[in-house]
Amino acid sequence: MLHSIFPGSVSAMEGAMTTCNTLSRWDEAVSAYLSNRRALGRGYRREETILNDVRAVLVREDRVDLDRVLFDRWRESFSGLSPNSRIVYERAVYNFCLYRRRSEPDCFLPDPDSFARRGPSPLPTPIEPEQIEQLLTHLAGVRPMRHDRLRPLVLRMAIILLYTTGLRRGELTRLTLADVDADQGVLFIRDSKFHKSRWVPVSAGVRTELRAYLAQRRQMGIDNRDSAPLLYTWQGRAYTGDGLYTSLRNVLTAAGIRGSDGRRPRVQDFRHSFAVAALRRWYENDADVQVNLPKLALYMGHVSIVSTAYYLRWMPAVIAHASQRFERAYAGVLQGGES
């Protein structure tokens, strides 16, 4: 009866069910791959999204596995992205297929020589203290929307915490009220990258800001349970990483924050600026930078100082301080005098 009324719909539904059933091998391989990688301490959320995107292509094309033709067809969907973005997608699928090859020698493996060629990544745009003041002044003048009175306060708190603690965006959005001790001045970062948790102390000024923010939340009748998110949206939910990214990007644009090269800082540049500021302070105070780097790595939640060094490479302000220290230590040698 149904076939006679909706022949096309039933046929399409049966085809989709057949494809889903025959994709069990693909799904098992993806599940095993993600579990393996996450056991090593990485979230692999982006990779999961990319592999789900490939799966959607398999379903749409009524295929049970990936081959070169389907891989190329999938790549066409993001051909308008920059080479650096395209290769992230391509490499994600390549690494998954390479993992499958261990147990399925005949499975498809993309040719890496056909991938986009990565170009030089732009250097971070440092955010200076006076620009943070400019951002906060801009937010103070933003008129709250009637249904979202907390938003300017939330973004102010987010900017202060990102700039003064170097938190990752995801770490900040996952904070709950139970993770914040404004009296003692510490934040508890739970199960972050590499499944690491850590305590992050904050300065006296940030402690004052936290207390004021929490008091304003209470006055507005915002959820005050321990499980409530620190950064609260008007819908009554925690900010997502993408949601916070978009909000902060819009604020940076509206406040006219630009680097010396005219580029707007990215949201991840808050974390970079925190690391660079710490390095500059050590140079200015004539502290031993190499001894202090492990402390910075621990504070920022890095596995080793190698990861920390990524944030400190060849920034003009750092180079100037390092050059001055080198000159003081070895000027006599370079000028041919006594060492």
Image (cartoon, helix red, strand yellow):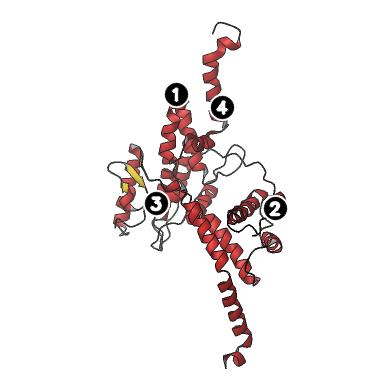
Badge 4 amino acid: Ile
| Residue 129 in view here | no
Which disc, if any, is residue 153? 3
In the orientation shown, which residue stands out farthest toward the top?
338
* Residue, disc 1: 288
Q: Position of residue 65 (x, y in %)?
A: 63, 65
Q: Which residue is mark 2?
A: 111
Please tell me the numbered disc located at residue 152. none
Q: Find residue 39 and report its horizontal and vertical position in percent.
A: 46, 51
Q: Which quadrant of the figure has residue 233?
A: bottom left
In this view, the mark in front (1 or 2): 2
* In this rendering, position of residue 231 left or right of residue 103: left
SS under mark 3: helix
- Disc 3/disc 2 C-alpha distance (Å): 50 Å
Q: Earlier in the sequence, mark 2 or mark 4?
A: 2
Mark 1 or 4, which is nearer the eye? 1
Q: Give the image quarter of residue 162.
A: top left
Q: CA distance from mark 3 to mark 1?
A: 38 Å
Q: Which residue is at a point 58% across and 69% down the rendered structure image? A: 23
Residue 319 circle label: 4
- Between label 2 and label 4, give the one nearer the viewer: 2
Q: Secondary structure at mark 1?
A: loop
Residue 334: % across, % down: 60, 12
Decide which of 240, 78 is in the foreground and name it. 78
Q: What count of labels does the image hold?
A: 4
Quadrant in the picture for the N terminus: bottom right
Q: Which image quadrant: the C terminus? A: top right
